[in-house]
Image (cartoon, grey):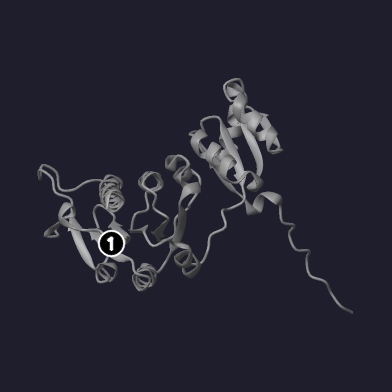
């Protein structure tokens, strides 16, 4: 006689979703991927001020519930929800090879080695979105939603954000595709402002205390320092990322103006 084992646990609809909270992140997800939003929760105490959000949800036929503040905090697992939380299907990401194939001739990538603080990560993603970076790799096991998405202020929808356990593999693939790998190193002799960025550039930044790992450092085409007064040892990683991406964008814009003038 055949014996059946215990029944498999039934999958809940919420098992395949991530939480997005914080108003800018919520509006960005709803604008970019309304079909991916499974359900929304609205803070009862803020339903008047969040009327535009509820109208947008209704327009996209997304079911939402108006709940007490305590329940919303439980759903979001955070009190920094700003009055709204979405349950969203994860963003579909391409493989590294497919991502590279889709890149234009001029493209910016960012690799963060050892940076795990969600506030730093979120700030870098927000900056990457502002300056038009197309992809960002986080080394290590890090949640790419929740607090990180809130701090990114919608940047998660504009940039492909990947988690990797092998930054060397990522950097070598980028290098083969014509990306110049540029590392941030405050001990480097080359100033950021004397370095000419390639059209395809991969910026690599490490955690403030540890810096870049030796395996990642060995993949650098060049390392650059951000000049300063020396009053402090270095910048926060999110500030360093902003300075480096800003200089890349400035050089690309300057080259584009010269080309147009010719």
Q: Residue furthest right?
A: 1
Q: Residue furthest top?
A: 48
- Image point 30% across, 48% down: which residue? 253
Q: Is residue 109 above or below residue 178?
A: above
Q: Is residue 93 above or below residue 166?
A: above
Query: Total marks drawn?
Result: 1
Q: Nearer the viewer, residue 18 or 128?
A: 128
Q: Nearer the viewer, residue 164 or 244?
A: 244
Let me know if residue 65 appears in the view: yes
**Image-based side of 45 in relation to 61, left or right:** left
Q: In the rendered image, which residue does mark 1 sit on?
A: 198
- Image point 55% across, 29% down: which residue? 83
**Image-based side of 215 in relation to 133, left or right:** left
**Image-based side of 256 in relation to 35, left or right:** left
Let me know if residue 212 appears in the view: no
Classify mark 1: helix, strand or loop.
Answer: loop
**Residue 7 percent location from the top left of the image:** 78, 64
**Residue 62 percent location from the top left of the image:** 69, 39
**Residue 63 percent location from the top left of the image:** 71, 37
Q: Report the quarter where the N terminus lies.
A: bottom right
Dot 1, how many residues are within 10 Å of its Cα: few (below 14), some (14-19), or many (20+)? Answer: some
**Image-based side of 215 in relation to 68, left or right:** left
Q: Is residue 171 above or below residue 48?
A: below
Quadrant of residue 52 within the rendered picture: top right
């Amino acid at each position: 006689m055949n014996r059946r084992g215990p029944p498999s646990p039934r999958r809940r609809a919420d098992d395949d979703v991530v939480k997005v909270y914080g108003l800018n992140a919520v509006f960005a997800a709803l604008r970019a991927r309304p079909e991916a939003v499974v359900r929304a929760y609205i803070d009862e105490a803020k339903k008047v001020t969040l009327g535009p959000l509820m109208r947008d949800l209704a327009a996209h036929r997304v079911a939402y519930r108006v709940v007490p503040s305590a329940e919303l905090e439980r759903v979001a697992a955070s009190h920094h929800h700003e009055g709204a939380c979405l349950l969203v299907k994860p963003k579909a990401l391409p493989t590294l090879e497919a991502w590279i194939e889709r890149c234009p001739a001029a493209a910016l990538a960012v690799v963060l080695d050892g940076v795990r603080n969600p506030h730093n990560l979120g700030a870098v993603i927000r900056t990457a979105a502002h300056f038009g970076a197309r992809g960002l790799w986080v080394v290590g096991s890090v949640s790419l939603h929740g607090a990180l998405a809130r701090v990114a202020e919608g940047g998660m929808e504009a940039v492909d954000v990947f988690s990797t356990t092998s930054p060397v593999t990522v950097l070598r693939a980028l290098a083969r595709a014509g990306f110049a790998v540029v590392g941030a190193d405050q001990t480097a002799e080359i100033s950021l402002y004397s370095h000419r960025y390639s059209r395809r550039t991969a910026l690599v930044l490490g955690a403030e205390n540890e810096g870049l790992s030796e395996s990642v450092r060995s993949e650098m085409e060049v390392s650059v320092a951000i000049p300063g007064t020396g009053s402090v040892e270095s910048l926060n990683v999110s500030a360093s990322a902003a300075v480096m991406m800003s200089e890349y964008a400035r050089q690309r814009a300057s080259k584009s103006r010269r080309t147009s003038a010719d």
